[in-house]
Amino acid sequence: MEKLSDHDKAVLNCIFNPNLPIGEAEITNNVDIQDSEECTAKNLETKQMELEAIQLAEQGKLQEAIKLVNSAIDATPNRPSLYNNRAHILQYLRQFDDALNDLTTAISLCTDQHKKTLSQAYTQRGILYKRNNKIELAKEDFENAARLGNKFAKSQLIELNPYAALCNQMLKQVMDQLN
C-alpha cells in the first residue's frame, strides 16, 4: 500500500481525534495512557503496540496496523481503547460493520477510568449510525458523548436538529451579508 497523502492523514486525524480542531493534535493522542488501568507489563506492552499500530496507520500500512492491534487484543482483550482504535482503522478500510461491532465492544468495556475512549467510541459509533441513516441511534450516541464533554458530538446533535440547523443557516446568511 502506498503512503498516505497529507489529506488522508488529516482525515485520519479527524477520526482519531474528533474532539479537536483539524491540525491541532497528532493521531497518537488517542491512546488512553492517562487511564488508571492496572499498570502491568502486559498492559504497558499492548499500549506500546497500540501506539505503533497508530503510527503504521498514519503511514498507510493499514493491514500491518490491524495485525498489530489484533495481537494486542489477543494479549489484553479487556482494553477498550484497542477496540476503539481498531474501529478507526476498519473505517478507513471501509469495513463499517466490523468497526461498528468494535465500537460497541469498546463501549461495553469502558469504565469510569476510560472516559476519553468512551467519548470517542460513542462519537464514532454515532457517525456510523448517521452514515447508515439510523438517526435516532446516532442522536443517542452523540448525546452520550456530549455528556462526556465531546464538542464534536455536540455539533453533530445540533446538525441533526432540523430547527437548530435552520437557525444556524439563517445566522450564517446574516453574518455573510454583514461582512
Image: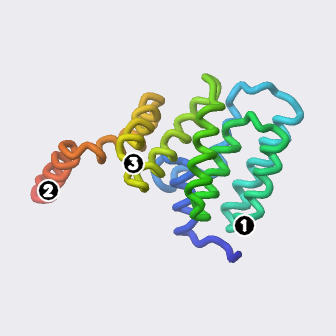
**Residue 8 location (% of width, % of height):** 56, 67
Q: Which amino acid does label 2 sit on?
A: Gln
Could you say whether the residue bearing mark 1 is in a helix, strand or loop? Answer: loop
Q: Name the residue under label 3.
A: 134
In the rendered view, tell whether residue 96 sits above or below residue 122. below
Q: At 16% from the left edge and 46% from the top edge, which residue is drawn? A: 167
Distance of label 3 from label 1 (alpha carbons): 31 Å
Circle 3 Cα neighbour tier, 10 Å, few/some/many (<14 / 14–19 / ≥20): few
Q: Of the residues under marks 3 and 2, which one precedes in the sequence? A: 3
The residue closer to the viewer here, 93 or 149, is 93
Query: Whole-percent x and y of residue 85?
Result: 65, 48
- Tell me the quarter of the image containing the C terminus: bottom left
Rendered location of residue 86, percent (x, y)? 67, 51
Q: In the image, what residue type sits under mark 3? A: Lys
Within 10 Å of disc 1 (Cα), the crowding (few <14, some 14-19, many 20+) is some
Quarter assignment of residue 31: top right
Answer with mark 3 or mark 1, whichever residue precedes in sequence: 1
Query: Which amino acid type corresponds to the residue marked 1 in the rendered image?
Result: Lys
The quadrant of the image that shows the N terminus is bottom right
The residue sitting at 41% across, 43% down in the picture is: 138
Q: In this view, does 172 lie to the left or right of 102?
A: left
State left or right for residue 65 relative to residue 14: right
Location of residue 134 in the rendering, given as x and y in whole percent from the top left corner: 39, 48
C-alpha span from label 2 to label 1: 43 Å
Tell me, for residue 61, which label it has, or none: 1
